[in-house]
Structures are given as structure tokens and as C-alpha cells.
Image (cartoon, helix red, strand yellow):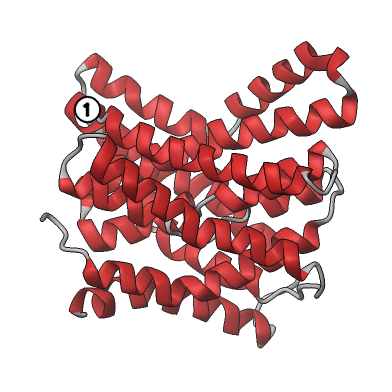
């Protein structure tokens, strides 16, 4: 219980602070976009760069964690896709719903949560999960959406477009740039480390406040069945599947298994909503699912951390 009070609740308090600031209109209407861009383009990439610049191969050499987390995503995405396609929905809409059902908030919430619960030794696990979510899952969903909207004849152009988009993503470029230093067996220059460190320290609080600002935005009602289907798959099925894989299928240290389960139990990130808005699909479903899953995660994540024994 002490761990919940000292590590988890302060994170949700930052989300609540952002929510209250938005409801009290302390910030302008563009605050969500501005702060989100700061986190995505500066603070979070700096944290990823910093972590990868000092990482060792032993910290990354955990294929069991990678497969457990990735297969957990795949199972939930497939289940959501199958359920939506039974209603003869469009491929683009089914892909966005599948993305929402399997998209944990690894970057904005997972990294600060792992740091608070397990310490800096869990940062590689959080980074791997963020990369799998932001690159593999996101890119796969974009390919399916583009195939539906443009037709299969443009598949090569679609794949090229996705690859270019992923390679321009600062959350992908930053850890790859940081990885150059351990590969060359050198440390980053002092001024660069100081610059990156100042930005990295702001990543977690700014990301969590941004979530609160986003949740305070008005969310249209309706689509209840689809919303609760997504929330159920995300909050129940994904951590259950990942737990089975992490503890009974793949071999990994206890901290990595606990991190895999905790990261998979996170609420839905903002990525599916942004993708729905980008392609002008039904964004109300993902927006409401994000809100409900985040509220529920206050209890579910706190309970999960309470029964864990970090380091054991």
C-alpha cells in the first residue's frame, strides 16, 4: 500500500491537476496541442535518448519480454478486429478500434509509472514497450487504414508512406540516435547530456498533465456497446494474456515479467484518437474509451501495483 501511495497516486494526481486546470480554464484552448507537441517532440524523445545512450546489450536482450508484450497486443487486436468485422464494419474503422483496444499508454504513463514503481532498471522495458506500441502497432494500423481508403493497388506507396512517417517520428529517431553511443562505446559529450537531462526531467510531469488536459475536453456520448467492448478488451483481456505469456510461456526475470503485465494493464493512449481524427473516422468512440479506461485505471493499476513486489 505504501508503494501505491508514494509511486502511483502522485502520477494520477498530476493527471487530476491537468484535468482541473482545464476545467477551470487556466490555460488557453490550444494548451493540449501545445503541451502534447512539447512532450512528443522534445521531452519524451530526450528521455528515450538519455536512456538508450547509457544502455547495455544485457538490458535489451530480453526476447521473452518483447514476445510476451507483442503477442498480448496481437491477440487483443485480432479479437477486436474479429468482433468489429462481424458487424461488417469497414476495415479502417475495425483497424482503429483494434488499435484502441490494444494500445497501452506506454509513453506518457508507462515510462513514469515504471520509474516510480521499479526504478531506472525498468526503463529499458518501458522503452521497448513504447517502441512496439508507437512503431509496430501504430504502423500496422496505418497500413490497414490506407489499404481500405486507397485500395490495395496502392499498397507499395502505402507502405513507403508508413515507413517514412515512422522514420520521421521523434519517438523512434531519438532512441535510435542514443543507441549510437553504446554501439561506439563512448559517452555523450557533457553539454549534450546536460541539455538532454533538463528536457528528460520534464517529460513525465508534462506528459501526465497533458493527459489530464485531454480528458477534460468534451466527449460526445453514444456508441456505448463499442466503447465498452474496447475498454473490456484493453483493461481485462490484454493484461490477462500478457500475464500468461510472461509467467508461463516465456522465460524472463521477475521484474521484466511484472513490467510486462503492468504496462499491458495501462489505459488506452491518445494515439488511436489522433489517428481517428487524422482520417476523419468516428473519433467519439476512441475518445470516450480513453476517458473511461483512464478513470478505471486509477483503481486497476493501483491494485496491480499493490500486489506486486518490485525486485521479487
Q: Is residue 10 left or right of residue 121?
A: right
Quarter of the figure with residue 194? top left
State whether residue 198 appears in this view: no
Q: Residue at x 47, y 70 (%)?
A: 297
Quarter of the figure with residue 222? bottom right
Considering the image in quadrants, where does the C terminus appear? Answer: bottom left
Q: Is residue 177 left or right of residue 219?
A: left
State whether residue 152 appears in this view: yes
Residue closer to the observer: 3 or 101: 101
Label 1's element? loop
Residue closer to the observer: 193 or 113: 113
Q: Position of residue 129 (x, y in %)?
A: 41, 41
Residue 17's place in the image compared with 267, above or below, is: below
Neighbour tally class for label 1: few under 14, some 14-19, many 20 plus, Cα within 10 Å: few
Residue 24's place in the image compared with 273, above or below, is: below
Q: Residue at x 44, y 36 (%)?
A: 70
Residue closer to the observer: 37 or 299: 299
Considering the image in quadrants, where does the N terminus appear? Answer: bottom left
Count of numbered labels shown in the rendering: 1
Q: Position of residue 250 (x, y in %)?
A: 26, 34
Q: Position of residue 217 (x, y in %)?
A: 72, 73
Residue where numbered disc 1 is placed: 187
Amino acid at each position: 500500500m505504501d508503494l501505491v501511495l508514494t509511486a502511483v497516486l502522485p502520477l494520477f494526481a498530476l493527471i487530476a491537476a491537468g484535468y482541473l486546470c482545464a476545467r477551470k480554464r487556466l490555460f488557453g484552448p490550444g494548451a493540449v496541442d501545445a503541451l502534447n507537441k512539447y512532450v512528443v517532440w522534445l521531452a519524451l524523445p530526450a528521455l528515450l535518448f538519455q536512456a538508450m545512450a547509457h544502455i547495455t546489450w544485457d538490458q535489451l536482450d530480453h526476447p521473452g519480454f518483447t514476445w510476451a508484450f507483442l503477442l498480448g497486443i496481437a491477440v487483443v487486436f485480432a479479437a477486436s478486429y474479429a468482433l468489429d468485422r462481424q458487424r461488417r464494419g469497414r476495415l479502417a474503422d475495425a483497424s482503429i478500434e483494434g488499435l484502441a483496444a490494444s494500445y497501452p499508454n506506454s509513453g506518457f504513463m508507462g515510462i513514469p509509472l515504471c520509474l516510480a514503481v521499479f526504478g531506472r532498471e525498468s526503463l529499458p522495458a518501458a522503452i521497448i514497450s513504447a517502441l512496439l506500441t508507437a512503431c509496430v502497432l501504430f504502423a500496422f494500423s496505418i497500413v490497414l487504414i490506407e489499404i481500405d481508403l486507397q485500395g490495395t493497388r496502392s499498397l507499395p506507396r502505402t507502405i513507403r508512406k508508413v515507413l517514412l512517417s515512422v522514420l520521421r517520428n521523434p519517438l523512434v529517431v531519438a532512441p535510435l540516435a542514443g543507441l549510437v553511443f553504446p554501439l561506439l562505446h563512448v559517452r555523450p559529450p557533457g553539454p549534450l547530456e546536460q541539455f538532454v537531462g533538463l528536457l528528460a526531467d520534464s517529460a513525465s510531469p508534462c506528459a501526465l498533465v497533458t493527459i489530464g488536459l485531454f480528458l477534460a475536453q468534451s466527449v460526445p456520448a453514444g456508441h456505448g456497446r463499442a466503447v465498452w467492448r474496447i475498454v473490456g478488451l484493453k483493461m481485462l483481456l490484454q493484461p490477462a494474456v500478457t500475464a500468461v505469456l510472461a509467467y508461463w510461456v516465456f522465460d524472463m526475470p521477475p521484474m521484466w515479467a511484472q513490467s510486462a503485465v503492468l504496462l499491458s494493464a495501462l489505459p488506452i493512449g491518445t494515439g488511436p484518437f489522433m489517428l481517428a481524427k487524422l482520417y476523419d473516422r468516428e473519433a467519439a468512440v476512441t475518445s470516450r474509451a480513453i476517458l473511461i479506461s483512464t478513470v478505471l485505471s486509477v483503481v486497476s493499476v493501483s491494485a496491480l501495483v499493490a500486489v506486486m513486489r518490485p525486485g521479487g
